Image (cartoon, rainbow, N blue to C red):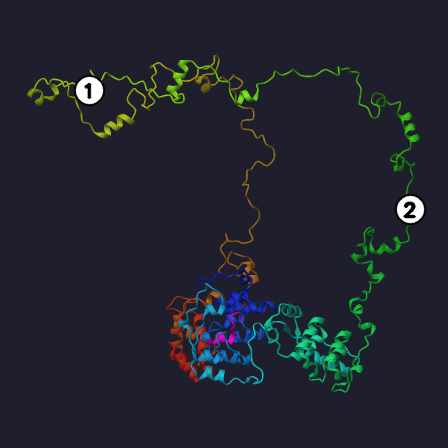
Amino acid sequence: MNYQPSLVQQQLPLLRLAKICDWGGLRKAVDKASQDQIEATDDYGMHVLHWAVTEANIPLGLLEYLIRAFPHGVRTFSNGGFLPLHLALMAGASVIRVQRLVESFPQSTILPIPSGHTPIMIFDEHLPMDTQALKRADGQQGLAAAKIHVWGNILVGHVLRSSSYRPDSNRPIKPRRHSTSMSGLSTTSSSAATSSSSSTASSLRQSSEECPSFDWRELSRRMSANDPTLDDIVDDRAKLLLMAVMKAPFDLFQWILSLCPECTRIPTSSGWLPLHVAVAHQVSTRRLQKLLEVYPESIHALTRQGESNAGLKQTPSANDSSAACLNFPARPGTPEAVRKFRKSYFAEPGTRIVHPGLIDDVKHIDATRKFGITSKNSDHVSDIMPAKVPTEHALITQQKLEALYMSSKREPLGTTYSRGHHFDPTATFGAPSEPSDVAKDVLYGIPFNETAETKALYKRSHGSCDPGEQKNRQYANVDLAKARFGMHKRKDEGGVEAILNPEMDDHVSKVVIAKKNVEDMKNTMDMLGKPRNLGFNHATSPDHVFGVKHAKGCADAALTIHGSYSFEEQQPDADLGKPVNRGWMNATDEHRSFGVPSIRSDVAPPSKRSIADAQNYGDDVNAHELLYPNQYSALGVEDAEFTTVRTKAFLTNLFSKMGYDEIPPDVLDQVYVRATLRTEYTPKGVASIQDFRVVLNDYLDARDAGPAAVGQWKAQL
């Protein structure tokens, strides 16, 4: 099936493992997953239990484990309107698996799918699994229904017909999607109210624990959207009203109270009315007024303990307030005698680090005391850099003090340095440029007078003619009245002799038939004493020389080859045969690595390794195997051992030693034959431990179900 998972499905590893039937990986993933990840659904509203029961051979232990991990999963409908029980029946699950699902949710035996088929109708009609209806997605291919097997009418039908659940005749059963009480709005609650007496507290706690906790945001959203199914999804409206009295927003509380006003008269198992719960939880006056408007007599009603509404009112103490819960007392500090020996004693900024034995002595020393002889104070920063703008008197005084400096005379404040140069203010620098051409003349050139020769030249080279002028190609036509066309016929000389001896006829070409490769060689190869004909056809004289003449005094080729070195330059170098670079002389590899490698793959491991030998010879496992070991790695067994091809004698002997020696030999032979037909882990015709174990589990499940199931198991081969 060509199915591309969406982004949401790629983020849910539990759904992916359930789809590919990786039961071992699914069990490990469920152990590590959170409750939100277990209850997550894909684009089709199917969670992990939905996908797990679509495989008929799901291990029974894994099915029970998923039901325990997600008990509400057996009650959840997919987007297509299927419960896990519906999918298990259409997948051909065994009777023991169907029985587990029915025991977890007996009401599912009467809930139909969107087509109207109840579980017993699905079983009786052998309804196949339709992937199109299952996922409600166009373009998906259906599963192979030909391979789906439905068990006989005796066992599975008996489980479905003998369910202990009997629906209430006065209340119709309507299927709900993704809901246990309020379509995903209900969870379990453990909140309890605080009371002044033990009897009131226990009764209030029991009343609170009997009520589930609802998602008021989701309920408010669906109410504002006018969801038509909102009135039918509430299992127990009395419990919903109790929770709305305590925790729901006021507008939701009003809506629920108008939905079920009769619930104000229904007490809990402790005898508490909604008004009692509201008084005990000290709700607002508006809520109490609404409850009294619907049921005024409840103000005089008593609980089973004989307590009235006035006796249920609680007076919170000062220690039970929200401020007391949020304000924690400060931690006791470290004693001073012990604190000086800790590093945190010097953690404050600016603290001098002193030996702990001298801390008490240093406390009596003046930290500001100066030692030595004090020097004369220098100029202060305030005198050099005044903080405020000087006055006019201060500026005049400073100018008088600085008048002696040469820099003040040559370059007074606010003027440039004067060197005594005098320039004509009207003088300009540079040479004047001549006026350039006008842009119009550059773009549109001035026409010039053409001569007849120039015009004829342009007609010949470019075909440039005046408008309307007829082209004259200068053909030299003959006089048609006198001219004769054709070739003059020569008179044959020789007659029969010329015919018999054509080589004597000068008018006959002396044709020499030569081979084509010889002609090709003459055209392409170099001829002796002649350059190759490249087809340029440049008419040059034989003594023509190409190139540019060298300037006089340039070195010729002989001088370039032999050189012109002086006697001193021809002597050997002074450092020939002597080291010049000081330091390390031995050249090493730039990529050389020093030391001994951690993994000694270059050394052969010993035949018998000691227990204390921790050296890695390249045969140890990597870090991934250490962080995520296999299930049986502690026993020294790898996962590959379960999928390795084994013989029949090895498999029967192995499972006999494991405690299955009471199984008859003919059954073991049939188990081996079925294992060889599986192609999940090994090719067809051979079997592995995993193949043998899966088939043996099917037989054990059938044996636990009874003789009829064993007979059906044997008849399947």
Kindly identify which numbered label has been placed on residue 369. Answer: 2
Closer to the observer: label 1 or label 2?
Answer: 1
Tag 2: amino acid: Arg
Label 1 crowd bin: few (<14), some (14–19), many (20+), radius 10 Å? few
Q: Quadrant of the N terminus?
A: bottom left
Residue 622 location, quadrant: bottom right
Quarter in which the C terminus is drawn: bottom left
Left or right of 520 on screen, residue 130: right
Asked whether, in this view, residue 692 is left or right of residue 425, the answer is: left
Residue 108 horizontal side relative to residue 674, left or right: right
Q: Residue furthest left?
A: 496
Q: Where is residue 416, by image quadrant?
A: top right
Q: Nearer the viewer, residue 472 or 400?
A: 472
- How far separated are the C-alphas under marks 1 and 2? 139 Å
Viewer-side residue, 40 vs 715: 40
Q: Marks 1 and 2: CB-CB under 8 Å?
A: no
* Residue 691 coordinates in the image, percent (x, y): 43, 71
The residue at 8%/18% (across/down) is 494
Secondary structure under tag 2 reads loop
Q: In the image, is residue 454 above or below residue 666?
A: above
Is residue 652 something one can see in this rendering?
A: yes
Residue farthest toward the top in the current orientation of the protein: 552
Q: Residue at x 67, y 16 (%)?
A: 430
Mark 2 residue crowding within 10 angstroms, few (<14) / some (14–19) / many (20+): few
Q: Is residue 246 left or right of residue 482?
A: right
Residue stretch in magenta? 78-89
